[in-house]
Image: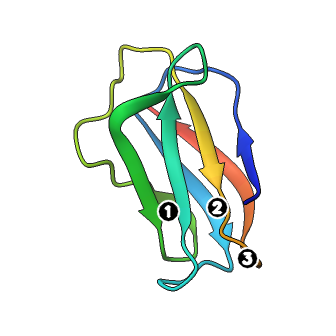
Amino acid sequence: DAHFITSTFTAGNVSLNVNGVTVVSPLTVQLLDQLDQPIAGYTATITQNGLHQQIQWPKPFPADRSVALRVNFPLNSSAKVYALYLND
């Protein structure tokens, strides 16, 4: 599967400008630590298109921690991520 990883950042939350996702073909988003390892409990799926689709994490976003984001595209996906927004 295709993916991309951001540089590390600190923020209150993250939203995406995304198009081409569906319930059948969602994006999977993971928070990563400074060594690009997944942080337990921080995996979410994006199933709706929109200019500012806020990522709904299963637990509170670690606003005081430097993290990176890995966005995974499903096989044969037509999804496009146009922008990431770091929100305070």
Residue that label 1 marks: 53
* Residue 48 rendering spot, x and y as whole percentages: 50, 77
Q: Is residue 16 above or below residue 19?
A: above
Tell me the CA gap for discs 3 and 2: 16 Å
* Residue 17 rendering spot, x and y as whole percentages: 64, 61
User: Is there CB contact under 8 Å for labels 1 and 2?
Assistant: yes
Q: Is residue 69 above or below residue 32?
A: below
Q: Amino acid at mark 2?
A: Asn
Q: Earlier in the sequence, mark 1 or mark 3?
A: 1
State how many labels appear: 3
* Residue 32 rendering spot, x and y as whole percentages: 52, 28
Q: Amino acid at mark 3?
A: Ser
Q: Residue at x 59, y 14 (%)?
A: 35
Q: Residues within 10 Å of mark 3 (few under 14, many from 20)?
A: some
Quadrant position of residue 1: bottom right
Secondary element at image label 1? strand
Q: Residues within 10 Å of mark 1 (few under 14, many from 20)?
A: some
Residue that label 3 marks: 77
Residue that label 2 marks: 17
Question: In this rendering, which labeled residue sits more in front, label 1 or label 3?
Answer: 3
Q: Quadrant of the C terminus?
A: top left
Secondary element at image label 2? strand
Front residue (pair 16, 75): 75
Tell me the CA gap for discs 1 and 3: 18 Å
Q: Earlier in the sequence, mark 3 or mark 2?
A: 2
Q: Hey, which residue is sitting farthest left in the picture?
A: 59
* Residue 39 rendering spot, x and y as whole percentages: 40, 29
Question: In this rendering, which labeled residue sits more in front, label 3 or label 2?
Answer: 3
